[in-house]
Amino acid sequence: MPTTKSAPAVNRLITALPSAERQRFLAGCERVTLTFGEVLAEPGSPLLHVYFPTESFICLTTTINGHTRLGVMLVGDEGMLGISLILGLNLSLLHASVLGPGQALRMESAQFCRELELSSAWQRLLKRYLYVMMGQLAQTSACNRFHPLEARLARWFLMAQDRAHSDYFHVTHECLAQILGVRRVGITKAASMLQKRKLIRYHRGDIRILDRGGLEASACSCLRLDQSLYAQFLESTR
């Protein structure tokens, strides 16, 4: 299936910087193409690079009992991978892998730390972004506990669509089951219900969003809360 992009290749965190600092920061970045399934960080390992997705998105997962992973966050052009560096910690807490392939901006961690020291604007911006991440993580925890799977799956599809900037993306039932912490049969049933109502088309891991409005009506309220929190964050940076 063809992928139709609906937004330019930018990262909103970098865009929120003052012009002069933004240009200096971009000069130190390299543009890379992230591939599906590429592992960018492992728990307890040093962060060699920070990543600012522009057209791609990254799935952050936490490990349970040493082998089972649970999805905790998606990072797209609204954010970055490597936020622990603003706390002075060059270690990853979470496993990070590419779920939506595409372009990203990358910078070596040591250089990024130097940029932080030089830029009070970056420090203020990323502290606010960290606050947003904390709020979204708390919301996801509550969502996983209290909301039905079909509503959670609809929310996840919308989050992926927003970060892919496309109504099409690829993710398997097995991967979704791992991310949402449920059995694969539960994902199959929930996706089938959404497809039966003509909200999505799903075949062998290829997902097409057919009716965003209908999918938003089926999703839990956590999606709107996440969007509201990020909108407040962006407003506070102006």
Image (spheres, rainbow, N blue to C red):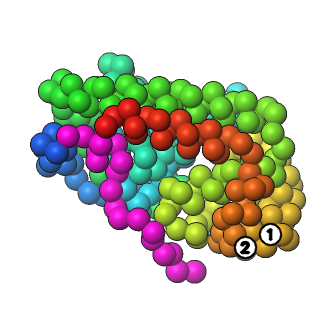
Name which quarter of the figure residue 128 lies in. Answer: top left
Quadrant of image for the N terminus: bottom right
Q: Which residue is mark 1?
A: 195
**Extent of the magenta region:** 1-18
Q: Residue at x 33, y 56 (%)?
A: 10
Number of residues whose C-alpha sits closer than 10 Å to that of mark 1, classed few (under 14), some (14–19) or many (20 or more) = some
Q: Position of residue 151 (x, y in %)?
A: 78, 49
* SS at badge 2: strand
Residue 68 lies left or right of residue 147; in this view the side is left
| Amino acid type for the residue under numbered disc 2 | Arg
- Which secondary structure dominates the residues rendered in magenta? loop
- Residue under label 2, please give it: 201
Identify which residue, 198 or 48, lies in the foreground.
198
Tell me the quarter of the picture where residue 82 sits. top left
Q: Residue furthest bottom?
A: 1
User: Looking at the image, is mark 1 or mark 2 earlier in the sequence?
Assistant: 1
Report the number of discs.
2
Q: Which mark is residue 208?
A: none
- Name the residue at 45% across, 69% down: 6
Task: Determine the residue positioned at 70% across, 56% down.
Answer: 216
- Foreground of the two, 7 or 110: 7
User: Horizontal and vertical percent for residue 149?
Assistant: 81, 47
Which one is nearer the viewer's eye here, 78 or 188? 78
Q: Does residue 128 appear anywhere in the picture?
A: yes
The three-letter code of the residue at mark 1 reads Gln
Q: Residue at x 75, y 68 (%)?
A: 199
Indicate whether residue 64 is drawn in magenta.
no
Q: Whole-percent x and y of residue 51? A: 35, 45
Residue 42 visible in image: no
